[in-house]
Amino acid sequence: KKHENSYTNLLKKITKLASENIEISVLDLITFLDTLITIQKRNPTYRKHMINSYKNIVNSEEFKKEVEIGINIAKEIDIINPEKYLENYINEVNTNEDKQSDMYLRTFIEESKSTNIAINKLLEYQIYVYHAPLGSQFVTSDSPGFTILPTGELLSIGGFGLEFQFIYPLTPICCLFINHQVRDNNDTFSLTKKIKIIHTDKETVDSINNCTYKIATERVFAHDNYILTKLVNNL
């Protein structure tokens, strides 16, 4: 609950109407980015990706080879048929939704290290907040935020390699933007970071909204219905 309250307060600060840079503590910014990435990991696309990845592992020949030695040992010391046990386990992973949910939650909890790596990567770059012009609004979706790779490919999470753009609509008026081409020139040991405000144009908002529409799993959300209508009509 405390974490959620911190996010709400930080969101208000980061998205307030301003004509100049916003200064924020590094610790607050880490909390904010951690919340954004956590929201991404909760979305249906990420959950499906993690479950399918796990299925691919347990159905692979490599997995079977790795457990083969254990099976041979188990045959000698265990009255349970280990081959039948493995067959049942693989079948559960492929078909049992409760088993899949347990696996996803366990992975979610264990991935704090990868989240920290992602946050540290993002902190290397200048952080911008785009403000939409009058008459335009950012939309969001059930898979909020995305990464654009140099090839134009959209990722619903991750992709923070050598070249990327990370975009995350925050409110109908504001959108977070991080570009690998612009590194943060703050002192490495500084306790604060400056977020630069960009009053962007309609074309940029429309481009970001198109990407949000493409990356959505099932639903796109807007503050006003006419924005959704215009988005769909312009595709």
Image: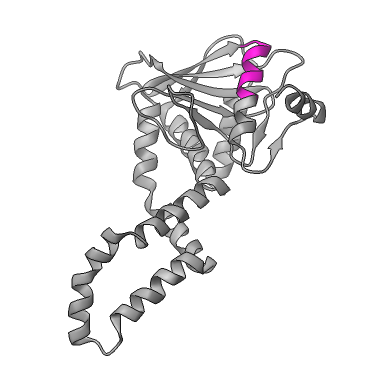
Between 24 and 63, the residue placed more toward the observer is 63
Note whether 52 is above or below 136 in the view shown.
Answer: below
In the image, is 139 to the left or to the right of 89?
Answer: right
Residue in view at x 66 percent, y 19 percent: 206
Quarter assignment of residue 65:
bottom left
Quarter assignment of residue 205:
top right
In the image, is 163 to the left or to the right of 62?
Answer: right
Note whether 192 is above or below 47 in the view shown.
Answer: above
As for residue 204 lying within the magenta part, the answer is yes
Between 38 and 16, the residue placed more toward the observer is 38
Bounds of the magenta span?
200-209
Residue in view at x 61 percent, y 23 percent: 208
In the image, is 74 to the left or to the right of 187?
Answer: left
Residue with the most extreme bottom position: 79
Residue in view at x 46 percent, y 54 percent: 52
Note whether 124 is above or below 92 in the view shown.
Answer: above
Between 60 and 201, the residue placed more toward the observer is 60
Give the image location of residue 68, x and y in percent.
22, 70
Give the image location of residue 156, x and y in percent.
51, 37
The quarter of the picture where the C terminus appears is: top right
Quarter assignment of residue 55:
bottom left
Between 47 and 24, the residue placed more toward the observer is 47
Give the image location of residue 103, x and y in percent.
44, 61
